[in-house]
């Protein structure tokens, strides 16, 4: 019975705890995307999905559909851990940058595309393996158009149009980017005819974030001002209702005893001061409501000044 009676009180305390109202800050991943930036990227990657779907449909001659699942900002190491041990990672070099962007998909998916492009027909995914020189040439030709669509969809968020540079088969051994580097990852579900699989697009965050912030600077400024005002309004303050203070010597304080009278320099008709952290924020007269003391605000410093 005692435990049951205390549970509502404990829950209320937890709800009032600031730790439950504000998310924990992850020092191992200090960079995060704000809501406006995430929406901007989602719109860009959805545009890319439509363009890439159309390209695959035209080149592979099988209806393709690409659906964006989510966009996230993580480290490259975290990204690589979510991929198969062997996969197709087509790297595109960016002007003036060492880190590439990457379009990733399954080797079995790519081999199915090659079969279709060469006039064959297949209703299932072939066994995954690395590309032969002829297959690699066909995949490269396809991906050059894909990088054009990626650049057009991101609309100035990249430093320039990506250029095909290489195909990597193991995400853990792609040496062109460090494991701790922050990357933006778009994850897709891919359907080609009756075959369903997945694909991802990875962009180096260092090449995108600054341009993303600049493109939404006005919205970000407005959001920051609104967020700051909200935090100020929700900041707890202790307020005190007090008489005008009197200054006396330390010896008089030590000699105070019950029955002593102190003459206060506060006129009887003057309202009390309402103070927050030594700053007068208003004037009020004391009162009561039921068993509780109250105060009625009579004026503020701005009104008195006027």
Image (tube, rainbow, N blue to C red):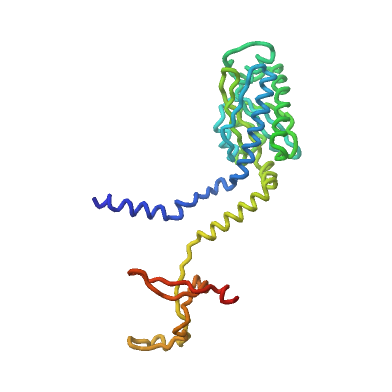
Q: Specify whether 67 is left or right of 156.
A: left
Q: Quadrant of residue 133?
A: top right
Could you tell me residue 45's position as x and y percent? 64, 34
In the rendered image, the quadrant that contains the C terminus is bottom right
Could you tell me residue 225's position as x and y percent? 61, 56
Please name whichever residue, 182 or 242, is drawn nearer the observer in this view of the structure: 242
Could you tell me residue 102's position as x and y percent? 66, 32
Q: Specify whether 22 is left or right of 101.
A: left
Q: Quadrant of residue 173?
A: top right
Task: Report the residue at 63% width, 19% height from top.
Answer: 63
- The outermost residue toward the top is 120
Give the vertical position of 116 relative to 86 (above or below). above
Give the vertical position of 283 relative to 115 (above or below). below
Task: Report the residue at 63% width, 53% height from top.
Answer: 222
How many discs mark residues in the rendered view? 0
Give the vertical position of 248 relative to 228 (above or below). below
Q: Quadrant of residue 62?
A: top right
Give the vertical position of 195 relative to 83 (above or below). above
Task: Report the residue at 67% width, 50% height from top.
Answer: 218
- The outermost residue toward the left is 1
Please name whichever residue, 214 or 166, is drawn nearer the observer in this view of the structure: 214
Task: Report the residue at 65% width, 11% height from top.
Answer: 120
Could you tell me residue 256's position as x and y percent? 37, 87
């Amino acid at each position: 019975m005692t435990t049951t009676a205390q549970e509502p009180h404990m829950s209320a305390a937890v709800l009032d705890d600031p730790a439950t109202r504000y998310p924990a800050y992850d020092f191992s991943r200090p960079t995060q995307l704000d809501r406006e930036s995430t929406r901007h990227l989602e719109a860009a990657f959805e545009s890319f999905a439509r363009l890439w779907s159309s390209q695959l449909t035209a080149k592979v001659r099988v209806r393709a559909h690409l659906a964006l699942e989510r966009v996230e900002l993580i480290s490259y190491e975290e990204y690589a851990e979510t991929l198969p041990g062997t996969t197709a990672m087509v790297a595109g070099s960016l002007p003036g940058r060492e880190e590439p962007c990457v379009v990733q998909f399954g080797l079995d998916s790519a081999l199915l595309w090659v079969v279709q492009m060469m006039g064959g027909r297949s209703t299932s995914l072939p066994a995954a393996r690395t590309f032969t020189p002829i297959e690699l040439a066909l995949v490269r030709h396809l991906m050059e158009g894909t990088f054009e669509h990626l650049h057009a969809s991101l609309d100035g968020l990249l430093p320039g149009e990506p250029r095909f540079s290489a195909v990597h088969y193991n995400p853990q051994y792609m040496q062109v980017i460090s494991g701790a580097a922050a990357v933006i990852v778009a994850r897709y579900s891919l359907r080609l005819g009756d075959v369903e699989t997945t694909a991802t697009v990875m962009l180096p965050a260092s090449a995108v974030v600054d341009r993303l912030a600049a493109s939404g600077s006005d919205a970000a400024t407005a959001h920051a001002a609104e967020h700051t005002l909200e935090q100020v309004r929700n900041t707890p303050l202790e307020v005190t209702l007090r008489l005008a203070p009197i200054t006396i010597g330390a010896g008089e304080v030590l000699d105070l005893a019950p029955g002593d009278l102190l003459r206060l320099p506060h006129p009887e008709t003057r309202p009390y001061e309402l103070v927050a952290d030594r700053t007068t924020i208003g004037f009020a007269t004391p009162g009561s409501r039921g068993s509780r003391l109250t105060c009625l605000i009579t004026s503020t410093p701005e009104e008195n000044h006027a």
